[in-house]
Amino acid sequence: MGEYNIAFEVQEWRRTQFGRRRVGTVIRDMQINVKGTTNQRPILTIPPDICVVAGTLVTGNVTATDADRNPVRITANSGILPPATFTQTSFGPPTAAGTFRWTPDCNNIAAQPTRVSFTAEDQPTGNNPVLIDQRVWNITVIGPAPQNLQASRLGNNTVLTWDRYICQRPGARILIFRRENPGPPIAGPCVTGIPASAGYTLIETLTYPTPPATGDLLSYVDTNNGLGLQRGKTYCYRIYVEFPLPAGGKSLASEEACVSFAGRSAVFTNVTVDATSTTAGRITVKWTRPGPINTFNAPLVYRLLRANGQSSTATFTEIARIVDRPNDTVYVDNNLDTQNRAYIYRLEFISNTTNQPGSGIVTETATAASSVRVDGTPDPQNNRITLRWTYNVPWDNSRRPATIFRRDPGTGSQFVQIATVTGTTTGGTYVDQGTTARPLVKGQTYCYYVSTNGTYSNPGIIDPLINLSQQQCVALRSIPCPPVLSLKRPNCDSLATRLFDLPATPASGPIYTNVLSWTLGATPPDCSRAIVSYNIYYAPNSTDSLTFLTSVPGTQMSYLHRNLTSEAGCYAVQAVDSSGTRSVRSNVECKEDCQLFLLPNVFTPNGDGLNDTFRPKVFTPIRRTSFRVFNRWGVKIYESDKEPLIKWNGGSRAEGNSGSTVVEGVYFYQADVEFGDVNNTKRTYKGWVEISR
């Protein structure tokens, strides 16, 4: 019991398009009085948290009971009161009650709930203190669903229309989703937007204009990115609204609108590699015949286009034009570089709009389909080869496993199946380690190809769709033998005894050279000693990561790292063979600077250019020196920390050596030195110096 005071800071934050931003703070004091009492606090009961569509009346009954049978006063507090109301209808005992009523409008839509705080306060007898109970009711206001979504055909496109949105707001966005065939219902009063589990794909986002621009968003034409939609399929759409920050929030999704395209579109079924070569490669391309064929006006034309790679946005070039042969749906593409390239194909079906010649237009375009491209990466350290294959096709290759074939050395042209792997809609991966009985052998070349098994899941289209990749040969070369590195280290004790004899430290500080040498190891036993170069890696100290420094020829077994401002550093070396295969890195060798610092006991600042400044002789980099000079009576006459090598010219009481010069005589100094090593070693040097002019 007693009185207590606390202070707390309240921060206000706002969600913006650039992230959360703090917009203000305020500090408040709170006094807490703790008293003894037999009174018991009331118990408050509020409705469960809810979601509500803007424009819908929210009603909530709030009650409170008090164990001491005291009357209870209930109040509500929120930024929405008014227009929201709370009316207490009874005070008890036994039960106090009240009713909350609020009809949120479009301005109340937000990602975060609106919070209404209710307080129950008892009214005890005598000197008993008033006690309370508080509860918060969260009301999430969501946008109403867009109404009257309609879908209709316009050639090979879909026209979507909907009613004017009642809660449209500048900066709000309408998101348009599409899927094939009707989707599942989107259940739940608080499920806004369209969940990923519904199977829809976002195809467009429309944004309401901001002032001074005006306008409604009431329609959209789905052209499938200019390719048109496929006949023989049913496409279903939903839309919803996403509101701008800072409030944010979403609407419910619209009802589903579907449209069916009669007939059958031309679609690719095969892009399979028949021959692997840099100049005589061959790919067979197949597609389905559009139908009913008698609904089109002759002449009927298939226009086949090709591009390098697997991107459907590449630049395509026409390679064939088949006129008035609608049943001719196979094309063999010759003289390709299937060894090094994948190819992607696009098909345009052209018919006349009327019976009159010269009115031909592109009736539909088949979704592009690429060849399967497989690449192999050898991993000689782990004695394995990693295969990765990719494709860009309109059918689904993920429902059935792909088959991996390998040709071993010495077996001629015989490929055998070694594995089946379930991939994704864009590719797959397989790691070939051989078998326990027959592991892969270093120094050998293995050849592979992949056979994919796809489907449209459409009974009207041939199934399965088998397509082959090119043949890819991978050499599993022996890894280079790893170097064994040696790094020449200084003898700090010997240097310390010879510091007087060492050359004077340059004005810019000492310059160092690190000497590296290495030999070739013999691990693993089958490693290769045919080395063409060595990569050298370096880090300034042992806490940094090694980075590439330089490369030297394979005949060179040493390296001088020159012009260093510090001897400290760590090194490793890696061997590289003619194929670019790298060994494991060598052992890491590190060295530290010798922390040597020697000051003379006499200097002659007379301007003759000889021994004019007081500076140390060092064999290590200095990061910082705090230097002070005192006369024989202990009076400080000079102080500076601007120059690591001191460079005092006999000036008095000044930074940068300005000020009057001191008289000849003996002076005492203290130098607090911070060395440039990884540990930032600090040492203090004290002594005397005689100035003679």
Image: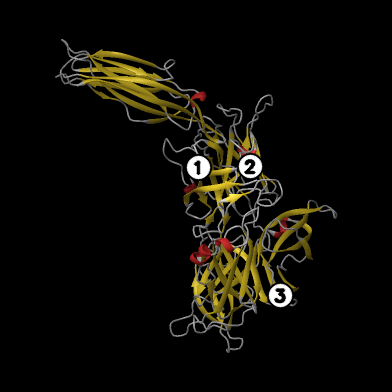
In terms of secondary structure, where does tag 2 sit? strand
**Residue 330 or residue 668, whichever sits in front:** 668
Q: Quadrant of residue 648?
A: top right
**Residue 273 or residue 543, whichever sits in front:** 543
- Label 2, residues with CA under 10 Å away: few <14, some 14-19, many ≥20: some
How far apart are the alpha carbons under marks 1 and 2? 22 Å
Check contact, mark 3 vs mark 2: CB within 8 A: no
Q: Residue at x 50, y 60 (%)?
A: 542
The disc labelled 3 sits on which kind of residue?
Arg
The disc labelled 1 sits on which kind of residue?
Ile
Q: Quadrant of residue 70?
A: top left
In terms of secondary structure, where does tag 3 sit? strand
Q: Which mark is residue 282?
A: 3
How far apart are the alpha carbons under marks 3 and 2? 43 Å
User: Which quadrant is home to the C terminus?
Assistant: top right
x and y, in percent, of residue 653 in the image: 58, 35
Camera-near label (3 vs 2) is 3
User: Which quadrant is home to the N terminus?
Assistant: top left
**Residue 611 or residue 132, whichever sits in front:** 611
Q: Which residue is mark 1?
A: 194
Up the image or down, 622 lies above or below 79; here it is below
Tell me if residue 323 can be seen: no
Up the image or down, 116 lies above or below 344; here it is above
The disc labelled 2 sits on which kind of residue?
Ser
Tell me if residue 115 can be seen: yes
How far apart are the alpha carbons under marks 1 and 3? 45 Å
Q: Is residue 390 left or right of residue 125?
A: right
Q: Is residue 374 left or right of residue 587?
A: right
Q: Is residue 445 left or right of residue 320?
A: left
Label 3 vs 2, first from the N-terminus: 2
Q: Which residue is mark 2?
A: 152
